[in-house]
Amino acid sequence: MISQLSETSPDMEPRVVAFIDIGTNSIRLLIVRIDPNASYTILTPLKETVRLGEGEFADNYLQPEAIDRAVLVCRQFASLARSSGAVDITAVATAATREAENQDEFLARLREEAELDVRVISGLEEARLIYLGVTSGVHLGDQQALFIDVGGGSTEVIIGTQRQHLYLNSLKLGAIRLASRFLAGLDDPVPSQTYSRLQRYVRHNMVHTLRELRTHRIDLAIGSSGTIENLADIAVRMFLQRPLQPGDVLTDTHLKQVVQHLCALSLEERRKVPGLNPARADIIVAGAAIVEMLMQELALSELRITDRGLRDGLLVDYLMKQGQLPSVEEMSVRRRSVFRLGRACQFDEAHALTTAQLALGLCDSARIAKLHRFGAWERELLDYAALLHHIGAFLTYSNYQVHTHYLIRNAELLGFDQTEVAIMAAIALFHRKALPRKKHPEFAALDKPSQQIVRTLSLFLRFAESLDRSQSGNITHASFEAMSRKRVTLHVAATYDCHIEIWGVQKHLAEFEKVFGHTLEINVLDLEDATDSVTPVSS
């Protein structure tokens, strides 16, 4: 049984909250509606480049023009948040503000002109929030990851698992900080000796950090921030001739070639490079030097790319403090994302949980009966597809499975890759009416291994849905048992008369024989005789 994400009160009302991240290069806004059932909806994500740290790092003073730009944007963002009904605005400032000698002046203007009480956070707190934001949107499983976030004034590096961070650090190395020191006023191509000096400076300033990072196991590396996203987008367009997509990576080989290409261009030419935000053209080479040095020194062959970061971490941190998320140690990105979608579609949670439990029991017992050889990964996808199988009824009951398929495919579920989303959506689509066939475009679009997964697991979901067709939780146990080479028995136990459920299952006997090549008999057990003897596949 899947636990609830949080305790909710029936008299709670939805509320709108906002988060503002005042960075060295950009200011980001996130406006969110949080519902009583712990689901939330992103209403407005915005980003504006203000260059707050421009001209600061020589003497640690925020320049008047930069302060004016930042205050103006913060005032507009705060006004938008309040007009959207935000009852709470959380605002934080990072490297540029925390190092500024005139920090108090800037914060006072934000209080007076934008009515914002801004919290200046330390580098370690910034790293912690980035960790929360990124891990809330990626699935690590048992892997231990290095997280790299290159900002305008600092670079945060984190080692962590899905459940906890093991190492946090913030380096005074940022794209604006380094560009101001090494590339200021340079409109021509970047000379090789200049880039070499930049690299040496970066290496010198991260020697101690590199030594610490090498003491940790790194199974994969994940890069966040606009600088890394732009570098990856340039690489994908150069080598794959398409824009950056979810699941793409930045390889060390491609990064080196991208850097060579960017250094060979003038500032004006860099502004026209596909995949590069023109506003980053003057700082992208400096940011690339940080990424390249980390990948080189730590022998990282690739970086997975995420668009999540500190702003998302502020939301996760807020929900945790409000008791609307479990602690980090209890988080499951994929499961939480699935529940968020289900609750946003007002699904019948009890029916979803029961259907998933029955589907997994059928899947596990079928594996023991040697009807399939799928493992923990396929089982997990069945679990999530079963939880979401009925959400299309939120739109209309007629052909709800078609709407469910659309919602799963387009909901941007966190922690899943495109193949996993396609499989889950197809399992939900084909749990009802026709079995999947090549003539169905949603099925034909899958590769052959994925088609076999969908063909098999959608049948388990079909049976599970029929076994809870009354949505009463009457069926307490269902499992397959191989009786002979071509004959299988479905054992079913119920708390009371289950003729309706058995009648529903009987409609699928021919489909079972078509998929598995076995005949199926149904055996209704007395409740006291029903034993849950199936051992689930470990996940």
Image (cartoon, rainbow, N blue to C red):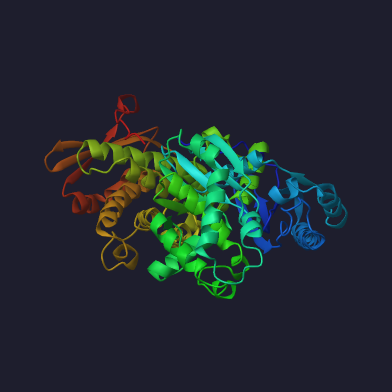
Residue furthest top in the image: 528
Q: Residue at x 61, y 49 (%)?
A: 173
Q: Give the quadrant of the N terminus.
A: top left
The quadrant where residue 490 appears: top left
Q: Give the quadrant of the C terminus.
A: top left
Q: Nearer the viewer, residue 189 or 236?
A: 189
Image position, residue 124 (x, y; %): 64, 39
Image position, residue 241 (x, y; %): 40, 71
Image position, residue 194 (x, y; %): 55, 60
Image position, residue 321 (x, y; %): 67, 37
Q: Nearer the viewer, residue 106 or 434?
A: 106
Residue 472 visible: no
Residue furthest front in the image: 193
Residue 388 visible: yes
Residue furthest right in the image: 112
Total numbered badges shown on the rendered structure: 0
The quadrant where residue 317 appears: top right
Image position of 425 (left or right of 434): right
Image position of 172 (left or right of 74): left
Q: Residue at x 19, y 49 (%)?
A: 516
Q: Does residue 106 lie above or below 235 as drawn? A: above
